[in-house]
Image: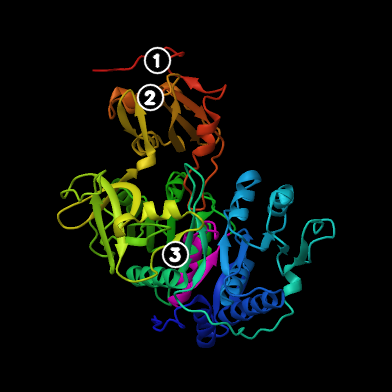
C-alpha cells in the first residue's frame, strides 16, 4: 500500500486522482450488478467538482448531503472535497425538526438530496431551512431525471445531478492540504442532540491508512459495506480504507441479516466492519448447513464479547475478529492485535495515540480501576478540530489537552483497554446506578429477542428513574414479559430488574446501528407498556 507523505498528497482529492492513474479501468466498486472503475469514479467526481465551481462554490463553503447508499454517493462526496469545500454529512434518517436543525447549524448554501422519501422529507421542512439557496436533486444517473413534479421545490434554485455531469472530467485546480477541513460529521445523537465534529483531510487519510495497515487489507481483499455511507463506518472504515489499500469495495443498499451471507458469497467478500450489534442480528438468524462455507476472513466489530467471538468463529469460520475502540471525535485509538488478541479487550493504544483512565476529578486511576476513557494523539489534525459553533462543548470535551470520551472503561497492567459502557447509559434507581448496557446484554441472551434498549423513565418524585426496556422479538414470536424478567434475576440485583417492558417492530438507529433512545425516552410509559407492579410480578430479593 502506498503511503502518501506531503500535505498536498494526504488529501482525498489527490489520492482519488493518483489511484485512478495507477489502476485505470480496474473495478473498484460493485453495486448490485453494476461495476465502477477507479478511472470512472475519478472522472465523474471531477465533473461534479467542476460543476460546483461553475455554481460559485469555493474552498471552505459548506455543502450538505442527504443521500442513501448508491454509487452516486462517492461521486458527490469526492466532488465536493476536491474543491476544498466542506462535506456536511447528514444522517439520512433525520426528518422534520431534527433535519432542519442540523442543516441550519451547518451554514450550508447548497444541499444534495436524493429522490423519493429523502426529497419528500426535505420538501416538508423547506420553509424552516434558513440558509440553503440551491438544491441538487440526486438521482441514479443510469435512470432518467426526476419528473417536473418531483423537482417542484419552490423556495430554491434547483438542479438535477444530471445537470452537473456535462462539466469537465479534468481535476479542478484547488489548493487543498491535509490540514484543511474535509467536512462535518454529526455525532450519533443517540441520547441527545447531535454535535457537528469538524474533521480534516488528514483525519480521514490517517484513519483509513492505519485501519488498512492493522487489518492487513490488501489488493486481494473485497470489502463489504451494508451500513449507511452517511457515517465514518461506510465512508472511511470501509470505502476509503479499500481505496487506499488498492482493494475492492462492495456497496449494498442497506443492512439485511437475511441476505447478508448471500451478498458475502456472491461478491466473494473477505472483510466486513460491523457496528452496533449488526452482526449479532446476522448470528441470530436460523443456522444453515453451509454457514461455514463463506469467504469472509476478517471482521472488525464493535462490540465483541469473548463468548460471541468464539461462537461466530466456530459457526461461520471467520479467521480474525478484531475489537477496537474509537469515536467520531478521536478516530480509532485502540486496536486488538490481529494475530494474538487478548479476548474481551479492545486492545492497546494504537500508534500515535495515548489512552488513560480518569476519575471524576480528571485524576488518573490505577490499573484495573473503572473511570472515564480519555484520549489524545501526538500528530496534528488526526482527531476532531472542534464541535462546529459549539465552543463551550469543544473546550469541555478537550480540557487538559485530553479528549474526554464520556465512556467508562479500564486498562489492565499490560495496557489493554476494556470498554464497559457509556456514561449516559447509567440509570439511577433508588440511589443505585444501573448499567443499561448490561441489562441489554443479558436480555439479548434470549434467542427469541433480536435486540432491545434499556433506558430510564423519570419517577413521579422527579429525583429517581424507573427502568424501561423496549424489545424487538423475532417475527411471529411472542415473548412473555415475565420470562424476560426471570431470565435476569439470577444475574443482576433486584433494583436492576426493569419495571416496564414494551414491544416494538423496529428501532430508529444512528448510521452506526446504535439504537436512538431519545425518542423512546420522550414517549415515556406508552399505553401498551407492560408494568411489572400492576401485573403483580414479585421481585426475588434473596
Answer left or right for 477 relative to 36: left
Q: Are marks 3 and 2 in contact (CB under 8 Å)?
A: no
Task: Classify 10 Å Cα crowding around label 2: few (below 14), some (14-19), many (20 and above).
Answer: some
Q: How is the image coloured?
A: rainbow
Secondary structure under tag 2 reads helix
Question: What is the quadrant of the N terminus in the image?
Answer: bottom left
Residue 343 in sight in this render: no
Count the marks: 3
> Could you tell me residue 111's position as x and y percent?
67, 62
First-in-chain label (2 vs 1): 2
Q: Which residues are magenta?
A: 226-252
Q: Is residue 10 above or below residue 371?
A: below
Residue 542 in sight in this render: yes
Q: Are marks 3 and 1 in contact (CB under 8 Å)?
A: no
For residue 485, which numbered disc appears in the image? 2
Q: Is residue 173 above or below residue 382?
A: below
> Could you tell me residue 271's position as x and y percent?
42, 64
For residue 537, which numbered disc appears in the image? 1
First-in-chain label (3 vs 1): 3
* Residue 151, picture quadrant: bottom right
The residue singled out by tag 3 in the image is 237
In this view of the protein, which residue sits in the foreground, 87 or 339?
87
In this view of the protein, which residue sits in the foreground, 145 or 285?
145
Q: Is residue 285 magenta?
A: no
Q: CA distance from mark 2 to mark 1?
A: 9 Å
Furthest-front residue in this view: 392
Amino acid at each position: 500500500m502506498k503511503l502518501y507523505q506531503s500535505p498536498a498528497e494526504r488529501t482525498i482529492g489527490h489520492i482519488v486522482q493518483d489511484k485512478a492513474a495507477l489502476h485505470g479501468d480496474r473495478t473498484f466498486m460493485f453495486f448490485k450488478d453494476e461495476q465502477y472503475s477507479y478511472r470512472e469514479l475519478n472522472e465523474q467526481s471531477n465533473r461534479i467538482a467542476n460543476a460546483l465551481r461553475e455554481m460559485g462554490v469555493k474552498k471552505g463553503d459548506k455543502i450538505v448531503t442527504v443521500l442513501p447508499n448508491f454509487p452516486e454517493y462517492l461521486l458527490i462526496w469526492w466532488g465536493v472535497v476536491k474543491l476544498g469545500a466542506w462535506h456536511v454529512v447528514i444522517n439520512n434518517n433525520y426528518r422534520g425538526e431534527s433535519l432542519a436543525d442540523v442543516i441550519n447549524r451547518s451554514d450550508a448554501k447548497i444541499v444534495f438530496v436524493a429522490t423519493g422519501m429523502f426529497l419528500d422529507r426535505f420538501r416538508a421542512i423547506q420553509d424552516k431551512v434558513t440558509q440553503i439557496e440551491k438544491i441538487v436533486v440526486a438521482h441514479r444517473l443510469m435512470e432518467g431525471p426526476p419528473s417536473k413534479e418531483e423537482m417542484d421545490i419552490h423556495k430554491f434554485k434547483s438542479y438535477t445531478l444530471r445537470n452537473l455531469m456535462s462539466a469537465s472530467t479534468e481535476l479542478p485546480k484547488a489548493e487543498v492540504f491535509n490540514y484543511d477541513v474535509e467536512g462535518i460529521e454529526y455525532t450519533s445523537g443517540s441520547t441527545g442532540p447531535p454535535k457537528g465534529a469538524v474533521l480534516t483531510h488528514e483525519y480521514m487519510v490517517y484513519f483509513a491508512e492505519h485501519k488498512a495497515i492493522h487489518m492487513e487489507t490488501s489488493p486481494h481483499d473485497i470489502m463489504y459495506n451494508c451500513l449507511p455511507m452517511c457515517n465514518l463506518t461506510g465512508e472511511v472504515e470501509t470505502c476509503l480504507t479499500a481505496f487506499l489499500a488498492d482493494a475492492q469495495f462492495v456497496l449494498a443498499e442497506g443492512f439485511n441479516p437475511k441476505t447478508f451471507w448471500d451478498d458475502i458469497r456472491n461478491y466473494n467478500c473477505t472483510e466486513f466492519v460491523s457496528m452496533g450489534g449488526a452482526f449479532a442480528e446476522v448470528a441470530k438468524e436460523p443456522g444453515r448447513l453451509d454457514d461455514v462455507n463463506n469467504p469472509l476472513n476478517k471482521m472488525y466489530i464493535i462490540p465483541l464479547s469473548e463468548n460471541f467471538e468464539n461462537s461466530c468463529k466456530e459457526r461461520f469460520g471467520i479467521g480474525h475478529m478484531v475489537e477496537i475502540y474509537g469515536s467520531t471525535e478521536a478516530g480509532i485509538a485502540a486496536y486488538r492485535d490481529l494475530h494474538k488478541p487478548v479476548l474481551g479487550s479492545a486492545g492497546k493504544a494504537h500508534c500515535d495515540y495515548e489512552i488513560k483512565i480518569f476519575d471524576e476529578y480528571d485524576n488518573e486511576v490505577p490499573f484495573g480501576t473503572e473511570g472515564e476513557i480519555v484520549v489524545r494523539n501526538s500528530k496534528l489534525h488526526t482527531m476532531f478540530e472542534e464541535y462546529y459553533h459549539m465552543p463551550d462543548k469543544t473546550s469541555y470535551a478537550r480540557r487538559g489537552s485530553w479528549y474526554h470520551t464520556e465512556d467508562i472503561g479500564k486498562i489492565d497492567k499490560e495496557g489493554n483497554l476494556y470498554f464497559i459502557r457509556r456514561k449516559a447509559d447509567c440509570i439511577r434507581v433508588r440511589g443505585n446506578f444501573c448499567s443499561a448496557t448490561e441489562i441489554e446484554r443479558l436480555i439479548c441472551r434470549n434467542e427469541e429477542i433480536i435486540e432491545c434498549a434499556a433506558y430510564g423513565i423519570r419517577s413521579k418524585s422527579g429525583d429517581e428513574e424507573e427502568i424501561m426496556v423496549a424489545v424487538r422479538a423475532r417475527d411471529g414470536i411472542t415473548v412473555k414479559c415475565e420470562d424476560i424478567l426471570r431470565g435476569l434475576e439470577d444475574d443482576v440485583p433486584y433494583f436492576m430488574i426493569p419495571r416496564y417492558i414494551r414491544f416494538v417492530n423496529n428501532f430508529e438507529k444512528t448510521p452506526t446501528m446504535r439504537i436512538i433512545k431519545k425518542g423512546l425516552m420522550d414517549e415515556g410509559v406508552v399505553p401498551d407498556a407492560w408494568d411489572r407492579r400492576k401485573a403483580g410480578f414479585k421481585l426475588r430479593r434473596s
